Image (cartoon, grey):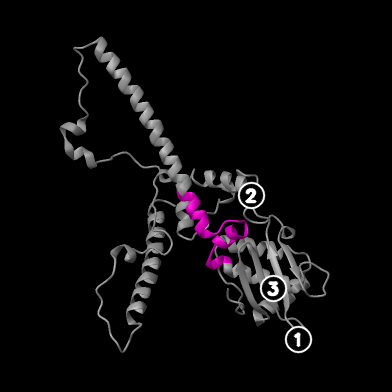
Amino acid sequence: MTNTTLGKEGLGQQPWWVVEWMELINSYRYKKRLERAWIYAREGNVLSIRFEGRRVQARVQGTEPEPYKLKLWLDVLNDEDWDFVLEALLQKARWTCQLLAGVMPDDIERAFAASGKRLFPFKLQEVRSECSCPDKANPCKHISAVYFLMGERFSEDPFVLFQLRGRTRTKLLEDLAEYRLKALEARAKAAAEAGASENAAAASDTNANPDQVTPPHPAVLDPTLWWRYDASLDGDLVVITPAMEGDTGLDAAGELPLAEEPKFPDAKKQFLDHLRAQGQVLGQQAMLAAMTAGGG
């Protein structure tokens, strides 16, 4: 469940994907209804918002004693569409790295264009919605109030947009890892086949010219060359892979020999939870620093 109130200044400075969402809302031509919706969002009339799978469920207090119930959703992408998106995402390591760091790539729509679809709705009518209020207009002020607060949720977690399109954060990252593994296996197989062909050709040349000796690689004569790579690296080919969500290394370390204190039975758990939380924060900061150092 997300926060259901807005400050007087609204959402404040936000990342670009939230700005785009807010611009989509403000494209609604009935400005008076948007003004009332903004007041609802700011004054706490939105009692609850739940992101349940591919839908958003909310309760908004209107003029009646009983809160209105509403739901919102986007058209989901089918498996074939997601296959195109995943293959496109793997073409640029930067996209994957930014998503793993919780940052929405500013050119993410290029990946979705491969499927002929979009991540962001192109117009407000593409956001499907229903409200139990008697207002026949859609979106009504209750739905619009939830729109404003959804922008805040997107700011906290850009993966919510993917979830509304049919892929949760966990599923998306699992699929990316699986697709990347398949791509690496295919490259390794191709390299092995190419190497076998070269070896066969070399053997043929040796048989034809038995006195010809292939010179050894320079690294064989000078082992210090094993650890050198003087060529510049393409930023899109350098993959910086952080730990999967929730993995800070503590689980791999096993049981830590921490003293037990009967007076504070939860102290150990609280300490480890704090370490995990700090590890995740520091991991994200390190990821962003690495991407900044590499030119984005």
**Element type at marker 3?**
helix
Quadrant of res 62: bottom right
State yes or no: residue 272 in magenta. Answer: no
Looking at numbered disc 3 in the image, what kind of residue is underneath it?
Ala
Q: Position of residue 37 (x, y in %)?
A: 72, 75
Evaluate if marks 2 and 3 touch, with contact meaning CB atoms under 8 Å apart: no
Give the labeled residue for mark 1: 65
Evaluate if marks 2 and 1 touch, with contact meaning CB atoms under 8 Å apart: no
Please provide the residue range marked out in magenta. Answer: 154-177
Q: Is residue 124 left or right of residue 258?
A: right
**Secondary structure that dominates the magenta span:** helix
Q: Position of residue 109 (x, y in %)?
A: 59, 50
State yes or no: residue 173 in magenta. Answer: yes
How packed is label 2: few (under 14 Cα within 10 Å), some, or many (20 or more)?
few
**Element type at marker 2?**
loop
- Any mark on residue 78, and which? 2
Of pointers 1 and 3, the one earlier in the residue sequence: 1
Is residue 94 visible in the rendered image? The answer is no
**Element type at marker 1?**
loop
Mark 2 vs mark 3, CA separation in Å: 29 Å
Of pointers 2 and 3, the one earlier in the residue sequence: 2
Looking at numbered disc 1 in the image, what kind of residue is underneath it?
Pro
